[in-house]
C-alpha cells in the first residue's frame, strides 16, 4: 500500500498524509483521524528508506554482544530490543566475542550511517580500542559498570554482590570457599574476584583458590570444578555465572559428592538455568532485561542530545537462596 493509495482511501491529499506521518500540527483533527483510520485498515508500513532520508536517521541500533550463547546476554538483548521497538527503533546484533577485528567489521555500520548508535557488551579492557573506532558516535556500555570515563554505562555493583555471596557461605559455616572465574579482561570478573577475596581477608579464612574457566559454558565450569576437586577440595564454590555453576554441579555429582551437604554452590546472573538444574541453584539475580532497557534509554538520550553528559547507572541486584546452599 503506497502513500498515494492511503490518500485516496482517506479522501485527502498526499501532502496531508505526509504531514500526518511526520506528526505535523498543521493537520485538522478530522483529516488526521481519516488518515489514521485508512492506515489502520490497510496495515500500511511507512517506507523506512524515505523516513531515513527525511530525518537523517536510520532508526537502527547496533548491539555488540561478547557471547550471545550466554543466557544472561540473551536476556539483556531481549530488554534492548523491547525498549528499542517501543521507541521506533530496530536492532542489528553482532556477536563480537570481544574480538577487535569482528568489532571493527560491525562498527563500519556507523560510518555508513546504517545505525544511529551503538550498545556494547564487550570486555572492558577493549574499550580504549573501541573508543578509537567509535569516535564521537552515540555509545553506551552495557552490563560493565565504569566509575570513570566518557562512555555512559549501566550495570550492577559486582563487588557488593560477590561480598554478599561469600558472606552468606561463611555465615553458613563454610570455611573452604573457592571461586570459579572467567576472563579477567572483563571488569565484572575482576570486581567479583575482588569481592570474593575481600571477604576471605575480613573473615580470616586462609583457603583461597581461584580456577579460571576457558569460557562461560557449562563444560568449562565442569572442567574448572574437576581441578578444584583434584586437590584439597572446597566445601563451597562461588561461580561468576550460572552456566559455570551448572557445570560445577555436574562435576560434583559425577565425583559422588552431594550438593549442598558436601559442597555448596552459588552462581551469578539469575537466568532460567538456575531454576532448571538439580538441585536448583542459589544465585545473584541481575535485572537483565531492565539493564538492556536502561541502556537503550541512555543511548536515545545521547542520540537526541549529543552534548548530554556521561551517565553511569547502577541497578539493584538480589540474592536468591535455593537448594544448592
Image (cartoon, rainbow, N blue to C red):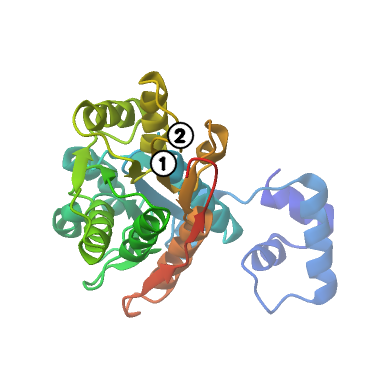
In the picture of the structure, the residue carrying the numbered disc 2 is: 259
Q: Residue at x 68, y 46 (%)?
A: 2
How many marks the image carries: the answer is 2
Dot 2 alpha-carbon crowd within 10 angstroms: few under 14, some 14 to 19, many 20 or more: some
Relative placement, left or right, of 182 versus 270 is left
Which quarter of the picture shows residue 134? bottom left
Q: Residue at x 19, y 60 (%)?
A: 131
Along the line of sight, the residue nearer the viewer: 103 or 153 = 153
Relative placement, left or right, of 231 versus 9 is left
Residue 68 seen in render? no
Along the line of sight, the residue nearer the viewer: 243 or 152 = 243
Image vertical order of residue 242 relative to residue 151, above or below = above
Along the line of sight, the residue nearer the viewer: 58 or 253 = 253
Mark 1 or mark 2: which comes first in sequence?
2
- Mark 1–mark 2 distance (CA, rounded to whole Å): 6 Å
Query: Is label 1 in a helix, a strand or a loop?
Result: strand
Image vertical order of residue 33 relative to residue 121, above or below = below
Image vertical order of residue 305 relative to residue 279, above or below = below
Dot 1 alpha-carbon crowd within 10 angstroms: few under 14, some 14 to 19, many 20 or more: many
Expressed as whole percent of the image width and height from the top left, the position of residue 280 reads 54, 38
In the picture of the structure, the residue carrying the numbered disc 1 is: 264
Relative placement, left or right, of 80 versus 142 is right
Which quarter of the picture shows residue 23? bottom right
Expressed as whole percent of the image width and height from the top left, the position of residue 70 reads 40, 38
Image vertical order of residue 28 relative to residue 68, above or below = below
Expressed as whole percent of the image width and height from the top left, the position of residue 143 reads 37, 57
Please state, as top left, top right, bottom left or bottom right, where the N terminus lies in the image: top right
Expressed as whole percent of the image width and height from the top left, the position of residue 50 reads 52, 53
Query: Is label 2 in a helix, a strand or a loop?
Result: loop
Amino acid at each position: 500500500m503506497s502513500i498515494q493509495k492511503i490518500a485516496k482511501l482517506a479522501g485527502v491529499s498526499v501532502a496531508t498524509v505526509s504531514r500526518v506521518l511526520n506528526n505535523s500540527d498543521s493537520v485538522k483533527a478530522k483529516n488526521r483521524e481519516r488518515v489514521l483510520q485508512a492506515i489502520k485498515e490497510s496495515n500500511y508500513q511507512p517506507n523506512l528508506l524515505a523516513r531515513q532520508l527525511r530525518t537523517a536517521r536510520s532508526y537502527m541500533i547496533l548491539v555488540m554482544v561478547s557471547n550471545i550463547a550466554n543466557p544472561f546476554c540473551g536476556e539483556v538483548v531481549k530488554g534492548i530490543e523491547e525498549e528499542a521497538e517501543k521507541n521506533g527503533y530496530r536492532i542489528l546484533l553482532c556477536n563480537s566475542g570481544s574480538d577487535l577485528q569482528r568489532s571493527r567489521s560491525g562498527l563500519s555500520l556507523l560510518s555508513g550511517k546504517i545505525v544511529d548508535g551503538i550498545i556494547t557488551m564487550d570486555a572492558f579492557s577493549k574499550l580504549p580500542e573501541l573508543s578509537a573506532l567509535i569516535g564521537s558516535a552515540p555509545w553506551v556500555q552495557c552490563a560493565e559498570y565504569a566509575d570513570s570515563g566518557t562512555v555512559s554505562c549501566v550495570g550492577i555493583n559486582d563487588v557488593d554482590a560477590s561480598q554478599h555471596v561469600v558472606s552468606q557461605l561463611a555465615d553458613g559455616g563454610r570455611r573452604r570457599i573457592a571461586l570459579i572465574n572467567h576472563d579477567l579482561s572483563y571488569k565484572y570478573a575482576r570486581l567479583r574476584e575482588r569481592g570474593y577475596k575481600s571477604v576471605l581477608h575480613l573473615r580470616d579464612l586462609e583457603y583461597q583458590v581461584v580456577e579460571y574457566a576457558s569460557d562461560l559454558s557449562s563444560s568449562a565450569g565442569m572442567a574448572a570444578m574437576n581441578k578444584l576437586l583434584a586437590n584439597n577440595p572446597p566445601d563451597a564454590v562461588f561461580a561468576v555465572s550460572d552456566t559455570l555453576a551448572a557445570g560445577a554441579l555436574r562435576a560434583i555429582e559425577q565425583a559422588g559428592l552431594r550438593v549442598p551437604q558436601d559442597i555448596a554452590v552459588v552462581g551469578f546472573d539469575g537466568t532460567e538455568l538456575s531454576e532448571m538444574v538439580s538441585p536448583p541453584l542459589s544465585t545473584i539475580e541481575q535485572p537483565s532485561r531492565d539493564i538492556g532497557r536502561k541502556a537503550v534509554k541512555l543511548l536515545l538520550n545521547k542520540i537526541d542530545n549529543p552534548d548530554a553528559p556521561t551517565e553511569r547507572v547502577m541497578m539493584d541486584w538480589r540474592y536468591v537462596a535455593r537448594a544448592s546452599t
